């Protein structure tokens, strides 16, 4: 396997190479397979032979040859008979990689990378397919790596990615920037996919671990990439800031045995000061520039948490106000749940419990373990220990996360003497 620097380079070059191949030859589905073959070849050959002088050109050449082989195969020929008849000879395809690299400027690379991101997050795809295809085509992960990241069999992920590429092929999406009228919605879809990847890494919904750092790291890397491509987009900036400010707390979120540590009990000296400073700088720069979106507001809330020297010093009234702004922007029950917690911290447990009662009728969250866990926490704050224990029991029953179950059982045990 390549070393860390080479691996980072491969992942950075993956969307550039895919963009160059698709722009030149078309066929996103087959081109993506060819690029994956080139990345795997680099992972095997570069450690033995050394990194080539022109890594991008090397990858384009190998991917082009792989594309030729794929398109000549019996299966590919059956799918593409009409098109194959019109193609030029392979020797004309394989222009010297160095010439291609010299003719493709930085702007073209950036445009191609953004186009690939937008294609992977096309509205015709399901959320799961968008995530899988983004991690593979833009992140440069193999299908096996994507499958491991989401704790599913490789065969399942192969089918998911294959269906996603087929959907793109069937939709006839041209390789190019979407129209001005579509661009905002497509970028919003990209942001949502990166947000989902980050959240699954930061608070895994299933499995033995609370967090999966490979996913949070990849989400942050892709958010940085998008920020470089769209530095003036306020929500892109807000999402990167939110990820940094949230991930800054990761070192203190678990004990050595993997037990969850709630924010109020975390050792704040272990928080990532560099991420906090970077995230605060980003959100401070973007908020005054115009209308705010949900990622900017969430980043501002995260900044208030991170800048508080102690849990007791947290500016809860300001956090309540920001959640109320967020609720006006987005009708999201999780936001309303977090708002109830903030209200409880600012005005007392009963005020928060009153807000929770309104959420119980919202089917989008009524069956979620988080609603029960928050109810248990607020009931515990209010001194209603028996009711708190019942709420924690229900939350533990509903969650599919082993670390969360262990945390909730520990809360229940801690209340046992308060019967």
Image: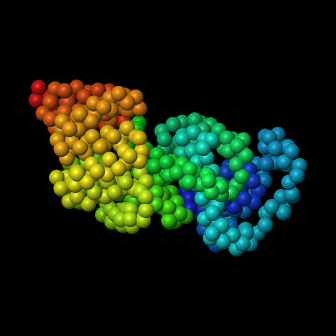
Q: Quadrant of the C terminus?
A: top left
The answer to whether any part of residue 276 appears in the image is yes
Farthest right residue in view = 85
- 41 sits left or right of 215 in the view: right
Foreground of the two, 358 or 115: 358
- 20 sits left or right of 390 in the view: right
Q: Position of residue 298 (x, y in %)?
A: 37, 52
Q: Position of residue 47 (x, y in %)?
A: 58, 63
> In which quadrant of the rendered view does residue 242 lie?
bottom left
Visual colour scheme: rainbow
Q: Residue at x 10, y 29 (%)?
A: 418
- Check the image and report above or below for 347 versus 140: above
Foreground of the two, 418 or 291: 291
Q: How many discs appear?
A: 0
- 292 sits left or right of 306 in the view: right
Foreground of the two, 151 or 281: 281
Q: Position of residue 260 (x, y in %)?
A: 28, 43
Q: Position of residue 88 (x, y in %)?
A: 86, 57
Q: Residue at x 60, y 41 (%)?
A: 125
The answer to whether any part of residue 37 appears in the image is no
- Check the image and report above or below for 257 versus 13: above
Q: Residue at x 41, y 51 (%)?
A: 294
């Amino acid at each position: 396997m390549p070393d860390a620097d080479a691996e980072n380079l491969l992942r950075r070059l993956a969307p550039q190479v895919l963009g160059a191949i698709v722009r030149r030859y078309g066929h996103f589905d087959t081109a993506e397979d060819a690029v994956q073959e080139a990345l795997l070849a680099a992972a095997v050959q570069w450690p033995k032979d050394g990194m080539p002088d022109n890594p991008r050109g090397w990858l384009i050449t190998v991917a082009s040859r792989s594309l030729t082989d794929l398109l000549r195969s019996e299966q590919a020929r059956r799918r593409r008979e009409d098109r194959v008849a019109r193609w030029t000879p392979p020797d004309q395809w394989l222009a010297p990689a160095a010439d291609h690299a010299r003719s493709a400027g930085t702007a073209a690379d950036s445009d191609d990378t953004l186009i690939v991101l937008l294609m992977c997050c096309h509205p015709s795809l399901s959320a799961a397919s968008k995530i899988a295809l983004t991690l593979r085509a833009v992140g440069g992960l193999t299908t096996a790596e994507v499958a491991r990241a989401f704790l599913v069999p490789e065969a399942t992920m192969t089918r998911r990615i294959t269906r996603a590429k087929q959907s793109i092929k069937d939709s006839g999406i041209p390789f190019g920037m979407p129209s001005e009228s579509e661009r905002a919605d497509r970028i919003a879809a990209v942001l949502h996919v990166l947000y989902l990847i980050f959240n699954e890494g930061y608070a895994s919904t299933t499995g033995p671990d609370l967090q999966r750092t490979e996913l949070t790291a990849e989400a942050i890397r892709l958010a940085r990439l998008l920020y470089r491509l769209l530095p003036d987009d306020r929500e892109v900036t807000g999402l990167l800031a939110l990820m940094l400010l949230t991930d800054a707390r990761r070192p203190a979120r678990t004990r050595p045995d993997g037990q969850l540590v709630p924010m109020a009990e975390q050792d704040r000296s272990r928080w990532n000061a560099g991420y906090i400073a970077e995230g605060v700088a980003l959100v401070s720069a973007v908020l005054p520039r115009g209308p705010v979106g949900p990622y900017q507001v969430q980043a501002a809330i995260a900044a208030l948490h991170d800048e508080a020297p102690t849990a007791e010093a947290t500016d809860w009234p300001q956090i309540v106000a920001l959640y109320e702004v967020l609720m006006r922007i987005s009708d999201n029950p999780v936001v309303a749940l977090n708002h109830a917690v903030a209200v409880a911290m600012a005005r007392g447990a009963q005020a928060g419990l009153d807000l929770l009662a309104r959420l119980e009728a919202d089917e989008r969250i009524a069956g979620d373990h988080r609603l029960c866990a928050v109810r248990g926490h607020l009931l515990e704050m209010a001194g209603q220990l028996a009711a708190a224990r019942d709420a924690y029991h229900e939350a533990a029953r509903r969650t599919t996360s082993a670390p969360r179950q262990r945390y909730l059982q520990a809360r229940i045990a801690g209340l046992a003497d308060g019967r």
